[in-house]
Image (cartoon, rainbow, N blue to C red):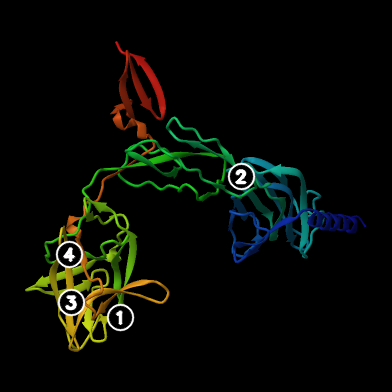
Amino acid sequence: MYLCLRKNVQEHIFVTMKTFFLLIALYTISGKQAVPSGDIPAGSSCVYEQTGNRSGQLMAGNMLTLTLSGCEGMTLHSVTLRMHSNTKSGAGRMTMAIGEAPIWMIYDASFSDETWYGDYSKEWVDISQSFSGLYVPEGDDITLQISASENSLYLQSVQLNYSAPQPKTYTVSFDTHIAQTIEPVTELEASGGIILPDIELNDANWRFYGWANEAVDDSEQAPSVCRAGSMYFPSSDCTLHAVYVQESDVQPWLPTDDLLLEDYLIALYTPGSELMLHATGPVTNGMLETVSQILPMENGWVSMPTDLISTNDIYALNVQNDTLTIRHKATDTPVLLVSGGKFASSAYVNNPWIISSSSVEGDDMPRHDISGIAGGKMYYFSFFISTDNKRYFRPTDSASKPHDLLLFALSDMELPDWMYSSYPSLSALTNTTIDGVPAYQMNVGPTILTIKNGKKYLQINE
């Protein structure tokens, strides 16, 4: 009668708890492994170890350990072990702990003892323990250890009934490292993220680059940042640090008149137009794709922006006795002239390109014409506007169509030097080291201003 009553009470507790608690994680022992199923805590992992030959069986002297990691933040409400013994034997001890603190212990006793099941059983039975809500701290594992002192104990599964951490909204603070301040921003809802603010820096030498997790001392390597206006999803309350970039002065990239065996960017310029086209990519459908951009001017000359150029825009030109071969650099494929006003990357007949200088009265900017004869017609390297208003380079047999080309030699392109820092105002200060930490110093009246680790110190100048 007592045995039946105990079984009924255990089944009632199990059903009630399963109904009440929303999250149930089950770890089933199979092949000497713990196979997770159900509501496994996000980011958690399990490791199962045992001695003995048969999975889940503990003979006298054998032991098993189940370690659950990454469960921090959850609240544990109950644990159910599904076990059985031999018909008339089986004994051992069990300890379950969160971190170093035991939460459930059974001292060495037979399976028929009240601390275990209260009777021997060859059938699988549930042994449960309820808690008043045990919080799992950060960095703590949940461990279960069972050792047998008498043949045999068997473990089929371990079930955790728990509640997950309540979602939180996090606050992001901003350290600009300049006089301008930005108020902290808190997520409107958990995991909703925030939009990163921008900084308008009143400095001709520096501009805002982005937000980093750590402050950046002067570095020529671009740090990993999140750009202003992008979404940022914090995993805790945190502070982001502003990073600024300084670009050195460089000479403008102007078209060249010296045609050598080297790499060029091919552009087409129409005086009076605000757009310039430059070729990009290999031959596709008898044409070359182009990039359109606004013309920067330097004393009446076109200056090509270097920051918009990719490896796909570069062509190798080889000029010999006014004839020209053109190859797309990245794909190493030729740009050939074929009849019908098309480009090709292969052809049975090689119609050579001819390059010549062209000039406009009152304008010293070097221009070139690239032309060739195919099928008895003279074609010029020009452009074509498709029905969807996209612009392509394509040969034309009309001498009246624009075909003044500008060639920008890569050897003439001067890339700027970049400097990244969270402390733009320190560019005029003396860079030094104090106690092994980078610092900046300058004289301010009768004092010395020292800035170290983003903090300012005033010292009387003796």
Q: Nearer the viewer, mark 4 or mark 2?
A: 4
For the residues marked 4 and 2, what is the alpha-carbon distance in whole angstroms? 56 Å
Q: Earlier in the sequence, mark 1 or mark 4?
A: 1
Disc marking residue 286: 1
Q: Percent position (x, y) of residue 117?
A: 79, 54
| Alpha carbons under labels 3 and 1: distance apart | 16 Å
* Residue 308 visible in rendering: yes
Q: Which amino acid does the dot numbered 3 rest on?
A: Ser
Sequence order check, earlier mark of 4 and 2:
2
Residue at 46% x, 32% y is: 180
Depth-wise, is mark 3 or mark 1 nearer the camera? 3
- Numbered badge on residue 87: none
Secondary structure of residue under mark 2: loop
Pair 3/2: label in front: 3
Look at label 4 and name its amino acid.
Arg
**Separation of marks 3 and 2 at Cα, in angstroms:** 61 Å
| Label 4 residue SS | strand
Disc 2 designates what residue?
A: 187
Of 408 and 79, nearer the camera is 408
How far apart in space, not on screen, are marks 4 and 3 (Cα)?
Answer: 13 Å
- 336 relative to 227, above or below: below
Type of residue at label 1? Gly
Q: Which residue is mark 3?
A: 371
Dot 2, crowdedness within 10 Å: few (<14), some or many (≥20)?
some
Residue matched to label 4: 367
Place residue 343 in its image quadrant: bottom left
Query: In the displayed structure, does residue 325 sit left or right of residue 32?
Result: left
Q: Which secondary structure, mark 3? A: strand
User: How many numbered markers are drawn?
Assistant: 4
- Which residue is at the front of the view, 292 or 27? 292
Cβ atoms under marks 4 and 2 closer than 8 Å: no
User: Which picture quadrant has residue 248?
Assistant: top left
